[in-house]
Image (cartoon, rainbow, N blue to C red):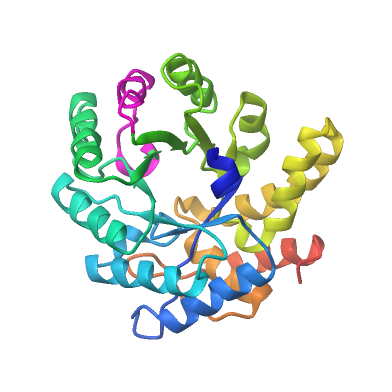
Amino acid sequence: MTFTEKYGKILLPLITPYNENEEVDYNQYAQLIEYLIKNDMCDSFIVTGTTGEASLLTFDERVRLMETAVETAAGRKPVIAGTGCASTKETIALTKRAEELGIELAMIVCPFYNKPTQEGIFRHYEAIARSTDMKILLYNIPIFVGVNIDAETVKRLAEIDNIIGIKDEAGINPTQVTDFFLATQDINPDFVIFNGDDVMLLPTIVQGAMGIVSGGAHIFGHEIRAIFEAFEKGENEKAKELFLPLYRFCKSTGQNGRILPNSIMRPAIELVTGIRLGPARSPLAPATEEEMKVTENILREIGKL
């Protein structure tokens, strides 16, 4: 079974709901998962990714969110564990906990804050891969972690059996998807390359990205699926028409220099789904009234409200 046969093309990084005290609301998390399954908004779930604010969660919160996702999804859609931490030691520990829960794939972000060298990055992933039987999807997001996983490093890592692919935040370097493809095609022609940036969906499909990790799929799951289908049929104008509303919405969640879109995306998802998610966890500042006017107007114009 290929990766997309098992996990599909739309991997949705779940938003983490909080109550008024910034405590994780696991009941709302389960409700969100039920909504997304009922409405078929994605092919697989990712727990505690960037959209799930992994860096703002404790180890135990992340484990409990994984438990909740596995129990709620109940085999109806695959669950992928976001297990990346700042240190190799903690990443291994969290990955082992995910494996104990029966999760088979870990998406592991490049270690953040430390800015390791390429050799440090290689050794980090090599140690994790040796510690587990889980499959590993590398996660490259230099805008947050401060370093890029270079194509040569990905080539070295692709030689490790259970490192099967990479998610790239393609907005940083739109052509790097091609670099990763060229670096790995002779080592593993089935090496998985996913785009991790909603606004780069169309450009990366053209380069051969097999799918997307999409926070926007909380709202635009059907449109994203239709974009893939249109592209595969050669209906490029239709793909572009479907893409523009997603593009406009995602751009609006980055108002005023926001790098992480959660502060605006959260209330937007609440408006569309009716599921209470609460504001982003500190230190992320909540959306302003002016910011929400912009995003709400876009949602109305494209028929989501």
Image quadrant holding the C terminus, namely bottom right
Most foreground residue, 217 or 80 = 80
Give the vertical position of 247 relative to 23 (above or below). Answer: above
Image quadrant holding the N terminus, namely top right
Q: Residue at x 59, y 35 (%)?
A: 210
- Please tell me in which quadrant of the rendered image residue 137 appears: top left
Q: Residue at x 77, y 35 (%)?
A: 231
Q: Is residue 189 magenta?
A: no
Whether residue 289 can be seen here? no
Most foreground residue, 207 or 102 = 102
Number of residue marks: 0
Give residue 4's position: percent from left, percent from top. 58, 42
- Please tell me in which quadrant of the rendered image residue 215 appears: bottom right
Q: Residue at x 68, y 47 (%)?
A: 247
Q: Is residue 144 magenta?
A: yes
Locate residue 11 relative to residue 117 in the image: left or right. right
Q: What stretch is highlighted in magenta?
A: 142-161
Give the vertical position of 246 relative to 263 (above or below). Answer: above
